[in-house]
Image: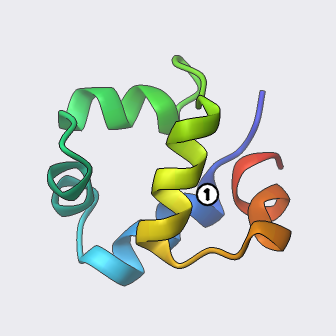
Amino acid sequence: MYSYSKLKGRTVERYGTQANFACKLGISKNSMSKKLTGKTEFSQSDIEQWAELLEIDKKDYGEFFFT
């Protein structure tokens, strides 16, 4: 299982709260929580969308999505 602590921090850094980021993504807070707790996997399109909104370079995907 992956740890998404760095990703969680980035969402709060950029959007103030995880709820604000979930709204920007157009998903529920529950759906976002499931991804960040590893209950639901990230799809490739999820990773690309999140990375774009959070300004994460492709070279840094591993740090945020696969640690």
User: Of 45 and 56, which appears nearest the observer?
Assistant: 45
Q: Is residue 29 above or below residue 30?
A: below
Please indicate whether residue 21 sits to the left or right of residue 54 in the image.
left
Please indicate whether residue 50 sits to the left or right of residue 57 in the image.
left
Colouring style: rainbow
Q: Which residue is drawn at 84% across and 57% down?
A: 62
Q: Residue at x 25, y 28 (%)?
A: 30
Q: In this view, does 7 lie above or below 46?
A: below
Please indicate whether residue 31 sits to the left or right of residue 63 in the image.
left
The extreme top residue here reads 39
Q: In this view, does 35 lie above or below 7?
A: above
- In the figure, residue 15 lies in which quadrant? bottom left
Q: Position of residue 39 (x, y in %)?
A: 53, 17
Q: Give the secondary structure at mark 1.
A: helix
Please indicate whether residue 37 sits to the left or right of residue 23 in the image.
right
Q: How many labels does the image show?
A: 1
Location of mark 1 (residue): 5
Q: Where is residue 22 in the image (x, y as percent from the top left)?
A: 24, 49
Q: Where is residue 34 in the image (x, y as percent from the top left)?
A: 42, 26
Quick one: quadrant of the N terminus?
A: top right
- In the figure, residue 2 lies in which quadrant? top right
Q: How crowded is mark 1: few (under 14 residues within 10 Å), some or many (20 or more)?
A: some
User: Of 48 and 33, which appears nearest the observer?
Assistant: 48
The amino acid type, in three-letter code, at marker 1 is: Ser
Q: Residue at x 59, y 31 (%)?
A: 42
Q: Residue at x 41, y 69 (%)?
A: 53
